[in-house]
Image: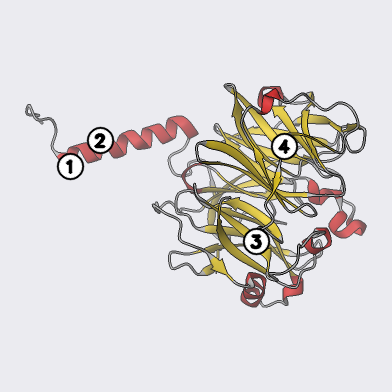
Amino acid sequence: MSVGPGGPPPDIIAVMYRVTAALLLTACFGFGASAGFTSGHPGLKSAGALAFGPNGILFIGDSLSGTVFAIDTRDTAPAPKAPPIAFRQIDRTLAGMLGIMPADLRINDIKVNPISKNVYISVSRGRRLDALPVILRTDAAGKIVEFPLDNVSYSKAVLPNPPVSNPRADYRNPRLETITQLGFTDGKVIVAGLSNEEFSSNLRVIPFPFHAVDEGANIEIFHGSHGDYETQAPVRTFFPWTISGKRYIVAAYTCTPLVLIPMSALKSGAKVTGATIAELGMGNRPLDMIPYRKDDHDYILLANSYRGVLKLPAENLDQYSPITEPAQMEGVPFKRISAWRGIRRLTTLDDANALVLRDSKDSGDYALLDSALFDSDSVDLASMPLP
């Protein structure tokens, strides 16, 4: 083939672009679409924390089996903008789809595919340990449908040291906290939760595609409201963040320390002490946390069981002195967003909007939602402009 002075024809350029893109995907992630995956039913025992990786890959945390599954959703048609979302009393809708009563449904997590902007929801069809895991999603028409798992392309990472199950404890069974949250950054899956080690609070960094899984790092923090060092409580919610050119995990714990943990320290078997940079009040459980940018500044939005939704600055977090003495409300300043009431789940929809699971009732302050994490009148799924 000869090429004139004007360069190759447009159709040849398109072919070259597609080949180059495929090679880049293989070089960066070790696979084209899902090479090395297995086809069939992954056999989830539970479906909790969700996260999205490259090319429409959905990570699902299965605490009961102590496994992180990677599912190729094939949901890769790009959407330039996320549509507004408003599902009133979504728990009743989902329960009707699954043929159960709303009281027997548990919504475990919500995440948005950053490519297609479709919403994925992990639920339990039942409230006991034998509850069936189900993944639901929105389709191109904006309707909620089941994402079938009977014949998918998947791989899995089995965690080597999950906590021992105590079936008598029901939903307080420590095995259910094997995986409290998932994240993906820099070609790695970040897994927060508990292990069976002496320092049971655990963070794992698992390269993707999955090959080997190490025992993770054991995490210790100073808990200001307790006035002591804590090694048993898991990270409840986190996000990866870059500060002064270094990668960190920004993590929130129950009662409510906000902690910086350097990713470079998360080696197999390491004992890592995080820097507590804020105490946001005891008697409170963090539910979800996201970073976002608005008006040329970076912020954190943190949804809580008792203290509502808090907005904190996300800039220069390494400049706050670590808290090493008893403290109740100290460190990174925050503002309570009083208009955001009854928020139970929180995730990023797009650059300007969050997606929330919130109490359907729209009156009162909705403090003390902790018991409502397990029992609720009803909840809505809605998009909201970031504050």
- Sequence-wise first label, 3 or 2: 2
Residue that appears at 89% across and 38% down: 225
Image disc number at residue 11 = 1
- Classify mark 1: helix, strand or loop: helix
Mark 4 surroundings within 10 Å by alpha-carbon count, few (fewer than 14), some (14 through 19), many (20 or more): few
Q: Nearer the viewer, mark 3 or mark 1?
A: 3
Q: Position of residue 200 (x, y in %)?
A: 85, 36
Cα distance between the residues tagged 3 and 2: 44 Å
Q: Nearer the viewer, residue 245 or 204?
A: 245
Image disc number at residue 16 = 2
Cα distance between the residues tagged 2 and 1: 9 Å
**In the displayed structure, would residue 79 be above or below residue 26?**
below
- Classify mark 2: helix, strand or loop: helix
Q: Nearer the viewer, residue 215 or 101?
A: 101
Query: Label 3, on which residue?
Result: 357
- State how many labels appear: 4
Q: Are marks 2 and 4 in contact (CB under 8 Å)?
A: no
> Residue 76 vs residue 193: left or right?
left
- Sequence-wise first label, 3 or 4: 4
Q: Nearer the viewer, mark 3 or mark 4?
A: 4
- Of the residues shown, which amino acid type is indicated by label 4? Pro
Q: Position of residue 253 (x, y in %)?
A: 79, 41
Q: Nearer the viewer, mark 2 or mark 4?
A: 4
- Of the residues shown, which amino acid type is indicated by label 3? Leu
